Amino acid sequence: MTSPEILHNPRVFAGTLSGFEGFRRFRSRVVDPVRHLLPVAVEVEAVPPSRAPAICEFLAARGFFVDDRRAAAGRLAVAGSLDRFELLSDLEEDRPPGILPLAAAIARAVALRFVETFEVPLPRGLLRLGRRPLVMGVLNVTPDSFSDGGRYLAAEAAIERALEMVKEGADLIDVGAESTRPGAKPVPVGEEIQRLEPVLDVLVERAGVPISLDTRKAEVAEHFLPRGVDIVNDVSGLTFDRRMGEVVARHRAALVVTHSRGVPESMQDDPVYEDAPADVARELRERIARARAAGVAEERILIDPGIGFGKRLEDNLDLLARIEELRSLGRPILVGCSRKSFLGKITGRAPEERVAATSATTALAALRGVKIVRVHDVREAIDVVSVLEAIDARHPVA
Ligand code: HH2
């Protein structure tokens, strides 16, 4: 049997029970609702159709709900409680044939869905990611970024803005010198380095928070990694420059692997997805594999669905609504919605007037387990996560 491709779509409907009085007491006694009662649904791909009936029978006999309506296309949806899924990891007998690897993969994907905290090693420390998402402040040292182009092209203005964001509570600063907005023209390596040169050294020295470098080019990363950059944020997800993975690995930096299709010049021309969250999950899985093959340790990888990178409005909305599905990839999720054009399409507002719209996405991301939000407006994002954290402290939702 070819090994089935799992595993997007683990979903938990966790909020439901938490509203009932007695939930917490109930939870600490004999039955843990999260473990025993809340349904988790998983979609499994590439199940050979000839094997599907036996697999469905096996799962149904063990108390799972199985939806086999798309079995002919190799897809099964499986729902059950967490403890049911845990049992799948302990099977001994491979009957029906092929069930063992499938069951182990499902159990692993579901378990990953419940991972709350990550520790990402950086060249100069450790990035701790917990329930409260970190806020990454955006610094564009560019003349043409869609929302702040030209404002921070002068080094002093850029440095001042970065330090201001740190004061406002930014946990990380992401510095970029090439706009990746739809239609943007690529910047030559030399010019990108020249723009960054007077800014990055000072920030590494003075910011007091990890610095992420937003570049698609290995040569640019290679230039700045030895000088204290901790994270490479490659919006092409290692597709633009084949050397990028190897350079990041050699410097033991962390890597944000973003999903994108095409290049900024043409990425919005005609994006097509069958099911955006599922397609993005699958393609991110391939890019994680590419990063690992280049030598990047799994624990240093973060993932990003690439909102606005080769996506239509409805794709962006589907990705946000189902962002939790990416948790089955087992890596912390970073999301960048800040002031993006899909928010303009909904609200009719210009980029600098999309702060409230951005806050809606920050709140949603925080509630759905996203670990880092990338924003221009740090102060507002900090307010959002602080309020949610205060509520969560009184009434944690599973
Ligand atoms: N979006 C932009 C740039 N870098 N990096 C990650 N990981 N995720 C994103 O969503 C993301 C990103 C685009 O936004 P911005 O930097 O404001 O604009 P521009 O590319 O025009 O400079």
Image (cartoon, helix red, strand yellow):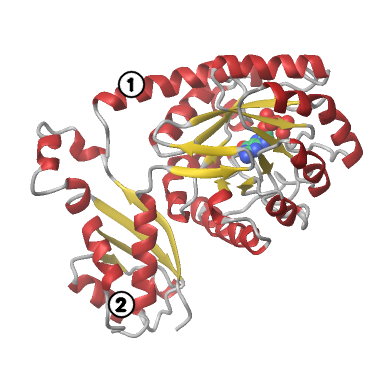
Tell me where residue 125 sits by quadrant.
Answer: top right
- Estimate the x, y position of residue 32 in percent, counting from the top left: 16, 47
- Estimate the x, y position of residue 59 in percent, counting from the top left: 25, 72
Q: Mark 1 Cα within 10 Å, few/some/many (few <14, many 20+)?
A: few
Distance Cα–Cα, label 1 vs label 2: 45 Å
Tell me where residue 168 sits by quadrant.
Answer: top right
Judged by depth in the image, the label closer to the viewer, 1 or 2, is 1
Task: Tell me if I can see residue 76 in this picture.
Answer: no
The amino acid on which the numbered mark 1 sits, given as a three-letter code, is Ala
Quarter of the image where the C terminus is located = top left
Residue wearing tag 1: 390
Residue in the image at 43% along x and 61% along y: 7
Tell me where residue 57 sits by quadrant.
Answer: bottom left
Please tell me which residue lies in front, 308 or 328: 328
Locate ligand 1 by image quadrant. top right
Q: Mark 2 Cα within 10 Å, few/some/many (few <14, many 20+)?
A: many
- Determine whether 152 is above or below 301 in the image: above
